[in-house]
Image (spheres, coloured by chain):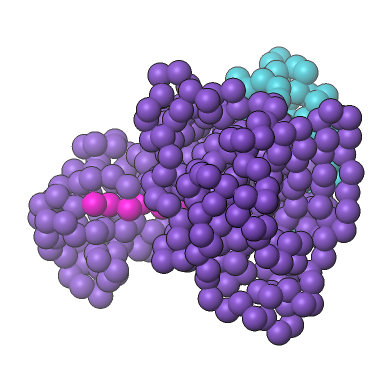
Chain colours: A cyan, B purple
Amino acid sequence: MTEAVKVDLEIDLKGEVCPYTFVKSKLALEELESGQVLRVVVDHLPAVENVPRSLDNEGHQVLEVVQINDSDWSITIRKA
Amino acid sequence: MAVSVRVLGQFPGLTRSRTVEGHGSDINGLIADLERQYPGFRGLVYDEKGEVLGYVNIYVNGDEIRSLRGKATALQNGDEVTLLPAIRGSALSFTEEQIKRYSRHIILSQVGGKGQRRLLEASVLLIGAGGLGSPAGLYLAAAGIGKLGIVDFDLVDLSNLHRQILHHNHDLGRAKVVSAAEAIADVNPDVEVVQHQVQLTSENVMDIIADYDIVVDGSDNFPTRYLVSDACVFGGKPNIHGSIFRFEGMATVFLPGKGCYRCLYPVPPQPGAVPSCQEAGVLGVLPGIIGLIQATETIKFILDIGESLNGRLLLFDALDMEFREVKCRRNANCPVCGDNPTITNLIDYEEFCGIRAASHQ
C-alpha cells in the first residue's frame, strides 16, 4: 500500500516519547497541504497506538501503521 | 562600531532576545561577531557560498542593504540593524524547548502549532500591574504572548501583596513594572516585556497603545478607565475590561465598533460618589478570578476561537459564588462610539477618590 502512496514529508521520531510523538507529528502535518502525506517513524511502543488515534481524532486519515524492524514502527497519515 | 540589532523570525530562538548588541565596521563584520556570540547565527543569514540568503532581509536604519552596498555596507556607532527573515508561520521553527513548553497548547485542536505561533506573535498591553494585571500578566506570559507591555507608575507596597501576585516581599518599594518584568521573565523567557513606568494621560496614551494588538484594562480608577476606553475607540484596539469591588467583579470585552465602556456608563461618577478599593477593601482572591477571565478572553481573541464576552457583561459575586450575565451592546447614543459622537478628543478627568490616577487594584 505504501508503495502507491507518495510521501511528502518524513520525520524520524525515534527516541521521542508520548505526548511529544503526537505533538511533533501534528506540527509536521501543519507544514503540509491538505491531501499530502506524512510518514513518521517511532520506537516508543505506546506511540504506535496513541499517535494514529490522536491524529484520527483531529480528522486526518491514518493510511498505514506497520512495524519496520525490531524496534521501529512507521505511521503514514494523509492530512485532512 | 557598536550597533543595536533587532532580530525577528527564527533568530530570537538562538539569541534568546529580540534585541542584541553587535560590533563590526560593516555587515559582514557584524555577522561574524554575532556568530561568535551566538554560534549558528551565520548559517541563518548566509548560504554555503557566503551570500545573504534570498529570504533574509537586512536593514540598516530602515534601508535594505541590497539597495546599499550589500554585505560591505558600512556601520556607524549607534546604527540600528534589523534582520527580517520571511515568516511563513512555520511550526517547525519552534525550538525543542518551545515544543515542550507549549505542548499542552499544541495538542489542543483549537490551538495547535499555528495558534501557538499567533500567541507568540501577539502583543498585549496591561494597564496596571496590580490585582487584575498580576494574574492576567502571569498567565498571558506563561501562555507565550510574545510581547507584554505593562503600564504602571506605582511602587510595590505591603498592602498590595494580599492580591497582587506579580510582586513579592523582596520587591517592597520597587517599581511595579520592574518587579513585574522580573516575575514574568522567571515564568517565560520567550516573552518580551516592555516597561511603561508612566502615568497615563491624554498626551501619552495613544502613543503607548499604538504598539499593541490588544489592551487589557486592569485600572482601578475612573480617570484611567475612561481614558483607556476612549483611547481604544480612537485607536481601534480591543479593550478587555475587568473591575472589582469588595466581593464583586465584572468583566467584558469591548471590540472596535462594538461598544465601549461609555456605552455602559456614559460619564464617570462624581468625585467621592463611589468609594475606592483603598476605602472599601477587596477580597484578595477576587482579582484572581476577574483577571483570569480577562486573560482568557485575550487568548480567545488572539486565537479567534469560542464565543467572545463582547456584548455581554459578566458579573461575579464571590459571597454567593455566582456568575450572572447582562447584555452590554454598543449604544447608538454613546458619546464616543455612537452614531453622533460628542466626545472626539481625549479627556483627562480630575483625579478623585482620594487616590492618584493610574494606581492600580
Residue A28 shows in this picture: no
The one nearer the camera, B35 or B174, is B174
Residue at the location (50% across, 50% down)?
B357
Q: Position of residue B121 (x, y in %)?
A: 54, 51
Q: Is residue B76 above or below residue B35?
A: below
Q: Position of residue B118 (x, y in %)?
A: 61, 51
Residue at the outermost bottom position: B340
Q: Is residue B65 above or below residue B339?
A: above
Q: Is residue B52 above or below residue B198?
A: below
**Horizontal side of residue A63 vs B27, given as left or right:** right
Residue A47 shows in this picture: yes
**Horizontal side of residue B334 vs B18, given as left or right:** right
The one nearer the camera, B192 or B25, is B192
Q: Which residues are magenta?
A: B4-12
Residue B238 shown in magenta: no
Residue at the outermost front position: B272
Residue at the location (83% across, 55% down)?
B312
Residue B9 shown in magenta: yes
Q: Position of residue B37 (x, y in %)?
A: 24, 36
Residue B173, quarter of the rendered image: top left
The one nearer the camera, B328 or B80, is B328
The one nearer the camera, B67 or A37, is B67
Residue at the location (30% across, 62% down)?
B58
Quick one: quadrant of the C terminus of chain B? top right
Count of picture labels: 0
**Horizontal side of residue B28 vs B107, given as left or right:** left
**Horizontal side of residue B242 vs B15, given as left or right:** right
Q: Is residue B106 above or below residue B242?
A: above
Residue at the location (41% across, 44% down)?
B153
Q: Position of residue B120 (x, y in %)?
A: 55, 46
